[in-house]
Amino acid sequence: MQVGTFIAIYFVVWWLCLFVVLPFKVRNQVDEGSWVSGTERGAPSLVKLWPKLLVTSLLAVVVTGLLLLGLTTPWLQEYWR
């Protein structure tokens, strides 16, 4: 496989992992007990995006590695044929 293929697979896996990680530890304004006037009450009170991006990147590395390992394992290639 070429480098561009690895990058494309990582990019797709990263986005999938982002959608998995985003809902964790989210507290909306109703849960906090106070909300800003003019905003949706279900909106997060404090968005902690940087830790989620870090977790997403690490998870995507692991998932991409497992995926590529599965794609290059000879006995799995025989199974998928």
Image: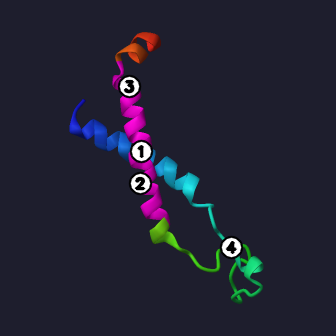
State the separation of the CA atoms marked 3 and 2.
20 Å
Q: What element carries label 1?
A: helix
Q: What residue type is labelled 4?
A: Arg
Q: Is mark 3 on a helix, strand or loop?
A: helix
The residue at the point 37 percent across, 44 percent down is 10
Q: If you read the primary sequence from the N terminus, does the residue marked by circle 1 or circle 3 appear first?
A: 1
Say if 72 sits above or below 30 in the image.
above
Q: Which amino acid does label 2 sit on?
A: Leu
State the separation of the CA atoms marked 1 and 3.
14 Å
**Mark 1 Cα within 10 Å, few/some/many (few <14, many 20+)?**
some
Query: For the image shown, how many numbered marks are present on the structure?
Result: 4
Q: Quadrant of residue 12?
A: top left
Specify the principal SS of the magenta part: helix
Q: Quadrant of residue 74?
A: top left
Q: Which mark is residue 58?
A: 2
Q: Which amino acid does label 3 sit on?
A: Leu
Say if 10 sits above or below 25 in the image.
above
The residue at the point 46 percent across, 59 percent down is 55
Q: If you read the primary sequence from the N terminus, does the residue marked by circle 4 or circle 2 appear first?
A: 4
Q: Disc 1 vs disc 3: which is toward the camera?
A: 1
Q: If you read the primary sequence from the N terminus, does the residue marked by circle 3 or circle 2 appear first?
A: 2
Q: Camera-side residue: 36 or 16?
A: 16
Range of the magenta residues?
Answer: 52-73
Quickly name the residue at label 4: 27
Q: If you read the primary sequence from the N terminus, does the residue marked by circle 1 or circle 4 appear first?
A: 4
Q: Which mark is residue 62?
A: 1
Q: Disc 4 vs disc 2: which is toward the camera?
A: 2
Q: Residue 71 carries which label?
A: 3
Q: Disc 1 vs disc 4: which is toward the camera?
A: 1
